[in-house]
Amino acid sequence: MSLMGDLREALRSALGLHPTLDLHGLGVREALAETEAFVLAARAAGERTVRIVYGKGRGSPSGRGVLRHVVPQWLDGEGSDHVERYERRPDASGVDGYLIAWLRRP
């Protein structure tokens, strides 16, 4: 990566600015398809970090977030060729609603 690219990434990280995918309202299949397309496109564009918002699941019929479980499972499995690591990010209540993923270099 160039010096400008490194500086841009450092600035984005310091300010918490990352390309973001919001999965609110999507079913599991659609959410996983969107996640895959987003990760592949971001990686191809040279992005190093992305934010994936899956919500807490309060709108789910069971009241438990299904996407909170299946998105990280996808990243650990099929997505592992594209993602170095990820971290869940909790809000003030301690419940996570999104994660930051570090992408592998193409």
Image (tube, rainbow, N blue to C red):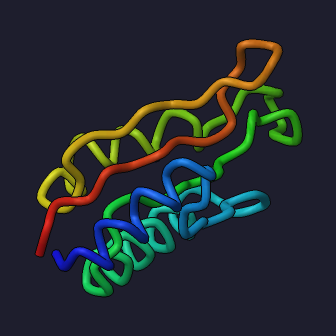
Quarter the N terminus occupies: bottom left
- Residue at the top extreme of this rendering: 94
List x then y, in percent, for residue 37: 40, 79
The answer to which of 21 and 71 lies nearer the viewer is 21
List x then y, in percent, for residue 69: 50, 33
List x then y, in percent, for residue 64: 73, 26
Residue at (32% x, 86% y) in the render: 45
Image check: 87 left or right of 16?
left
Residue at (52% x, 61% y) in the render: 12
Residue 13 lies, with reference to residue 40, above or below; the image says: above
Image check: 57 left or right of 30?
right
The answer to which of 70 and 87 lies nearer the viewer is 87
Image check: 23 left or right of 48?
right
List x then y, in percent, for residue 3: 23, 74
- Residue at the right extreme of this rendering: 59
The answer to which of 36 and 92 lies nearer the viewer is 92
Quarter the C terminus occupies: bottom left
Image quadrant of residue 89?
top right
Residue at (79% x, 28% y) in the render: 62
